[in-house]
Image (spheres, rainbow, N blue to C red):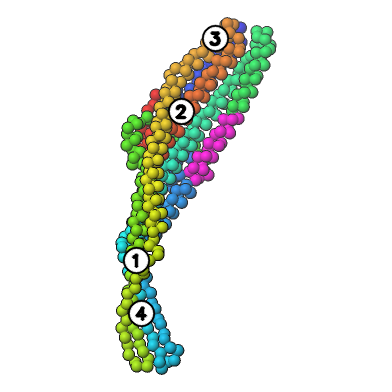
Amino acid sequence: MQKLFLPLAVVAVLLCTMLFPASAQAQTSVKNSSPLTNAGVMTLPMAIAQALANNPDIAAARREVQASEGALRQADVMPNPELSVLMEDARQDSRSTTIQINQPLELGGKRGARISVAERGRSLALNELAIKSAEIRAAVTTHFFAVLIAQERQRLATASLELAQRASHAASRQVSLGKIPPLEATRAGIAESGVRVELAQANSELLMARQRLATAMGNKLAAEQQLQAEFHTLPALPDMRKLTQALSRSPLMQRAQLEVDKRQAMSALEKSRQIPDLTLSIGNKREQQTGRNQAIVGISIPLNLFDRNQGNLQEALSRADKARDELTATENRLHGELLQAHQRLSLAREEAEMLKKEMLPGAQQAYELAIKGFEYGKFNFMDVLDAQRSLLQARAQYLRSLSEAQRAAADIEAYIGDSEFSLFTATSSF
C-alpha cells in the first residue's frame, strides 16, 4: 500500500522544487549567467538604450528639436532690404529714372522679443524630448518585467500541469484499486483541464508581453531575445519628500513652466509690434533731359490709427494667464498622481512581502499536510486538490504583487523623468 501512495509524495517534492525558483540552485544559475555566455541575452539597460535609439517617438522629438533650432536661427535674421526702380515718362529724351534701396528698421525691441520666443520654443522642444525619453524608459521597464513575469507564469503553469497530470494518474490508480470513489478521479480530470487552460493563457500572455516590449523598443528582434534580470527583487521605496523635491525639477513640471515663459515672451513680442517700424530709403534719380543726378533720402513710418495690434496683444496676455493656471493645475495633478503611485508601490511591496513570508509557506505546508493525510486515509482527494489550488493561487497573487510594484516604480520614474534616478538600481531584496 505504501508503494501506491509513493507517486503522491513525489508530487509534493516536485511541487516544492518547481514552484519556488528562488532556491539556492536556481539563484546560483541566475547569478552565474551573463551576457557573455548567453547568446542573445538582453538586460534592462540594454533594452532602454535600444529603445532610446530606435523608438519613432524619440526620433520625432529629436526632429522637433532640430526644427526649433531652425526657428531660432530665423528669428535672429534682420529684414531684407528692398530694391526699387521707378521710370517716369516713356520717351527716352524726357525720361527720369529713380533707383533706391529701402531698408526696414525694426523698433520697439521686436528682434529681441522674437528671439526670446524662439528660445522658449527650443527649450520646450528639448523638454519634450526629455519627457518622451522618460516615458520610453518607463514603458520599456514595465514591459521588460512584464515579460519576465509572464515567463514565470508560463513556467508555473507548466509545472502545475505536470502536477495535475500526476495527481490525475494517481487518482485513477486508486479508483482502480477501490481506494477512492470514481468521483475523485473525475474531479482530478477537471482540475487537469483547468490547468491546461491556464497554460494556454500563460503562453498567450507571454507572446503579447514580448510583442509589447518589441514595440516599445522599436525593434522586432527584441521579441525573440532572452531577458536577464532578477524580477523577485522589489523596487526601492523612496521617501515621499525627496520625490516631491525631485518632481519640482521634473520635465513634466518644467514643460508647464516653460509654456508660461513662452507665453510671456509672446506677449512681449505682440506688445513690441504696437510700435511701428521705420523704413529708410536711399537712392538716386537721374533726369535724362538735363543729365542731372539727384540723391534721394527718405523715411516712412506707418500711422497707427486703426490697427494697433490690440487684438493680438489681448490674445497673448490671455493665453499667458491661461498658461499660469495650467501650471498650477499641472502641479496639483502631478503631486496627486505621484502620491498615488507611491502608495501603490508601498502596498504592492507590503503584499509581496506578506505573501513571500507568510502565505506562501503556509500554503506550501497545508499542501504537504494534505498529501500526508491523504496517504494515511485521513483526507480525501478533494482536500489535496483544494490545497494545491490554494498554493497555486497564492503564487499567482505573489507574481501580481511583484508586477504591480514594478509598474508603480516605473510610473514614479516617468513622473520624475531623471535618467539618473532609478528605483530599479537601488533595489531592496527580501
Q: Which numbered disc covers residue 276?
A: 1
Which mark's residue is nearer the viewer, 2 or 1? 1
**Alpha carbon separation for disc pair 4 and 3:** 109 Å
**Place of residue 306 in the rendered image (x, y in percent of width and height, measured from the top left):** 40, 65
Which three-letter amino acid code belongs to the residue tagged 3?
Answer: Lys
Where is 23 relative to 335, above or below? above
Q: Which mark is residue 372?
A: 3
For the N terminus, the image quarter is top right
Q: Callout 4: helix, strand or loop? A: strand
- Residue highlighted by disc 2: 402
Mark closest to the chain's N terminus, 2 or 4: 4
Image: 98 above or below 427: below
Under tag 2, what secondary structure? Answer: helix
Task: Indicate the amino acid at tag 2.
Answer: Leu
Q: Residues within 10 Å of mark 4 (few under 14, many from 20)?
A: some
Marks 2,1: beta carbons within 8 A: no
Marks 4 & 3, CB-CB < 8 Å contact: no
Viewer-nearest of labels 4 and 3? 4
What distance separates the C-alpha of mark 3 from that of mark 1? Answer: 97 Å
- Residue 81: percent from left, percent from top: 36, 73
